[in-house]
Amino acid sequence: MASDSSHRRPDSPRVWCNMTMPDALVEQLRRGIGVGGGELVLATKTFASNLSPGESDPQIKTCDVAFGQPDPRDVIESPRVVWVHINTAGYTRYDDDRFREAIRARRGIATNSSDVYSEPCAQHLVAFMMARARALPAALESFRERAWNYEPLRRAQRVVAGDNAVIVGYGAIGQRLAQILLALRVSVVAIRRNMRGDEAVPTYNFDRLDEALSIADHVFNTLPSAAGTRELFDAQTFERTKRGAVFYNVGRGDTVDQGALRNALQSNHLAAAYLDVTTPEPLPPDDPLWTTPNVYITPHVGGGVQDEQQRLVAHFLDNFTRWRTGQPVVNRIV
């Protein structure tokens, strides 16, 4: 693997972290950093959920590396931070010119944790798809009613082999999703903003989104929240989607006009929607999405996995080793 000597790497890096973790995991992180000649500095206030935006902490300005959810202004104003490793896949708060310029001015980098969340998020989307194909929601209702609805449930069963799918947003999650769909013999195309040339499925720019939507039985949205993605899925987009398609969202809620989504479902243009993210979050109990026909919602748990914190720490320490030894880091965003 080629080395990367362009980044500034202090000899004895101080690593700031604002994740709440069990003591044993803190010690594992401390030891891993220590092997690389570094020192762990825990934030004044830590947070158990990585969906929390964190808080400003003056200690970060004495550190070289930030792991977790640092306050973007702290990073910008710090004279010392040269690497930020975010413990989420999404990085909306850091998708800012001032943040990028500050990092680059110090010959630094920023990375996220996409590799930690690609597998659970992809499996969550496939679970959504297979639950519908195998009529599991209807079967669950029969179970609750203690009804043996053999004939209607058997007739409702189908397989997904031969279906067409479009993945909108072909990052780590989309790439893993494509692998699973191909194994199920689903035909897959992807849409992404910047083509790399090494995509494993036919991949197009957004100017061909309408074409892809017009033939897709399954529309998978894995887009992050960004200026160019807000309400990308609006009334016009849904109108151009194949009638009877199923829409899935594990990206961010604000990429969807939820009023337009409800209209598309109520008119039966879309057959169903499976959502792991909404706007706002938590979704208020009186929001009409809860009672819209054929909508199924999970509470932003698509990236969840029982050993999530251990995976986050392992991912960071792997990148820490790469960074310290001049190897290319993974999940780089700046």
Image: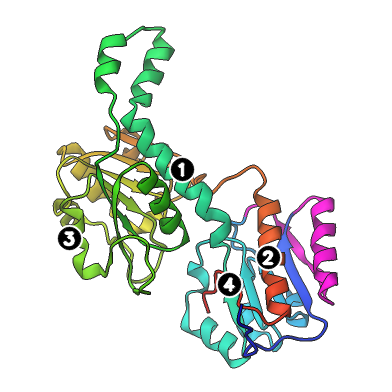
Q: Secondary structure at mark 3?
A: helix
Q: Secondary structure at mark 2?
A: helix
Residue that badge 4 annotates: 111
Q: Amino acid at mark 4?
A: Thr
Of the pair 3 and 321, the residue shown nearer to us: 3
Among numbered discs 4 and 3, the one appearing first in the sequence: 4
- Look at the numbered discs 1 and 2 and tell me whether their residues touch, using CB distance below 8 Å: no
Among numbered discs 3 and 1, the one appearing first in the sequence: 1
Residue that badge 1 annotates: 124
Residue that badge 2 annotates: 316
Residue 86: image location, x then y, percent: 60, 67
Tell me: residue 290, above or below residue 15. Answer: above
Q: Is residue 79 left or right of residue 193?
A: right
Disc 4 packing (10 Å; few <14; some 14–19; many ≥20): many
Residue 227 seen in render: yes
Marks 4 and 2, how far apart at CA: 9 Å
Marks 4 and 1, how far apart at CA: 24 Å
Tell me what residue is drawn at x 29 percent, y 60 percent.
231
Tell me: residue 131, above or below residue 195. Answer: above
Q: Amino acid at mark 3?
A: Asp
Q: Secondary structure at mark 1?
A: helix
- Look at the numbered discs 3 and 2 and tell me whether their residues touch, using CB distance below 8 Å: no
- Look at the numbered discs 4 and 1 and tell me whether their residues touch, using CB distance below 8 Å: no
Of the pair 203 and 71, the residue shown nearer to us: 203
Residue that badge 3 annotates: 210
Tell me: residue 155, above or below residue 277. Answer: above
